Amino acid sequence: MFQQRARLEPHPVSHYESPFGTEVFITLRTRPCKHARKNGPCKFCGLHKQDAQWADAGPLTEEELLVQMRKSLADLPAGKRGTVRKVSIITNCHSTITPDVIPVTTLNKGLSFLVKKLPKLRHISLETRGDMVDSRTLEEISNNRDLVNRRITKELTIGVESGIEAERLNTGKRLSDQQIASAAKILAERGWGLRAYIIHHLPGRPLESATADFVKAAEFMAGLRGKFPKIPLTICTMRGYIPAERKEKDAFSGYTPASERQVIESLLAAAEICRRNRVTLSVDLTDADQLLTNAVHVPVTKFQRTVEKFHKTQDPTVLRNALRRKRQNL
Ligand code: SF4
C-alpha cells in the first residue's frame, strides 16, 4: 500500500529586525493551496505549488509540526534564538489555522513548544486567507495557557495584496473589502491584531502607479482603523518579485519589481497616514525566492538597514534622510 512520506523538512527559516524586534519566519511544509486548486492560482503567486507532492496528504500531524519547528529553530544563526521577539508561522497554502492544514489542538502544541524554546518571545503571527477566519479557532488559540502566561500578543496575517478592491479581484484573489472588514471584526472581538500583506508593485499594474497604489493601501487600513479603533493594525509590504518558474508568463512578462528608491518613496508617502491612524508600517525584507532557497544568508544591504531603522522608530524622517542621501549619490 502507498504510504505518504512524512513532512519533516520545513522550508528555510528566515529572520530580520521587524518593528517588534527580531522576527523569525517559519515556513511549514504542509499541502498545496486549496484556493489555487479550485479557482486557479492568484496571478502573482509563485508559492502555491511548492508543496505539490503533498496534494493528497492530510492535515499536519503533531510529530510533523514539532519536527519542522525544531529544525527551523536549529537553523537560526548561533545566538539568534535568544533574541527572538516574534515568530510568524506561514505556509505555502491557504491557511495555518484551518483544520484541513493544521488542527487547532496540534497548532496549540506547536505554539507551546515555541514559548518554551524562545525565552524572549512576545508576539505570534499566524496566517490565513481573509475569507477563512474562524472565531472559535482564534478563541482556542487565545486560551492556550502557555500564551496567556507569557502574555503573548496574537496577530493574523492576511494577504490583502492591494488597497484597491478591483485590483484584488482582478488578480484572482477573490477577496472583497467587505470580507476583509468581516475578518477584522472577528479579530477585534477576540483581541487579535491584523497584519495586511500588500504587494508594493502588483503584477499587471504600471510601475509608475506603485506609490499611488501603496498610498491607497494605507488609506484602506485607515478606513479599518475608523471602524475598529482598538485593533493593532500593520501593513507589511514586499517589493514584488518574479517567481522562478513564471518568468516568461502572463502577469510577469515585462514585470519589474520596484527599485529600492521607489519603495522608500512609497513608504514615505504612506508613513504619515499610517502614523495618524496608528497603523504600523513594515517591509518584508525576505525576498520570497530567497526565502525558499537560502534566506538565512541573505546579505544585509543599505536598503535593509534603512528599513530596519524605520521599523524601530516609525519616523518618516528616517526615510526622508535616506532619499536625500540617495539623490546626493546620483
Ligand atoms: S496567494 Fe495564497 S490564496 Fe492565492 S494562490 Fe497563492 S497561496 Fe493560494
Image (cartoon, grey):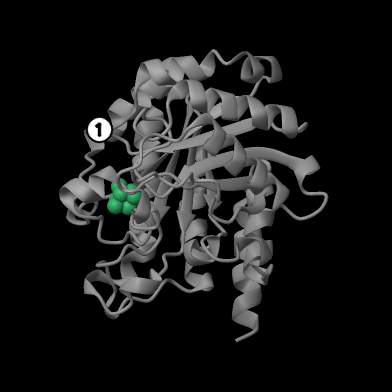
Residue 174, image x, y percentages: 20, 45
Residue at (60% x, 62% y) in the render: 295
Q: Is residue 112 left or right of residue 243?
A: right
Q: In which image quadrant can residue 136 be found?
A: top left
| Residue at point 69%, 45% (across, down) | 73
Q: Quadrant of the C terminus?
A: bottom right
Residue 307's quadrant in the figure? bottom right
Q: Nearer the viewer, residue 155 or 248?
A: 248
Q: Residue at x 51, y 28 (%)?
A: 107
Visible residue check, residue 295? yes
The residue singled out by tag 1 in the image is: 179
Which is more toward the observer, 286 or 328? Answer: 286
Image location (x, y in percent) of residue 172: 20, 53
Q: Nearer the viewer, residue 246 or 75?
A: 75
Q: Is mark 1 within 8 Å of ligand 1?
A: no
31 to 11, vertically: above or below? above
Question: In the image, is residue 96 above or below residue 146?
Answer: below
Circle 1 residues within 10 Å: few <14, some 14–19, many ≥20: some
For the N terminus, the quadrant is top left
Relative to 14, is 327 above or below?
A: below
Q: How many marks?
A: 1
Q: Position of residue 201 (x, y in %)?
A: 37, 64
The residue furthest right is 79
Residue 289 position, x and y percent, is: 48, 66
Q: Secondary structure at mark 1?
A: helix
- Please, what is the three-letter code of the amino acid marked with disc 1? Gln
Nearest the camera: 177 or 267? 177
The image quadrant that residue 99 belongs to is top left
Q: Is residue 162 visible?
A: no
- Which residue occupies 58% across, 43% down? 68
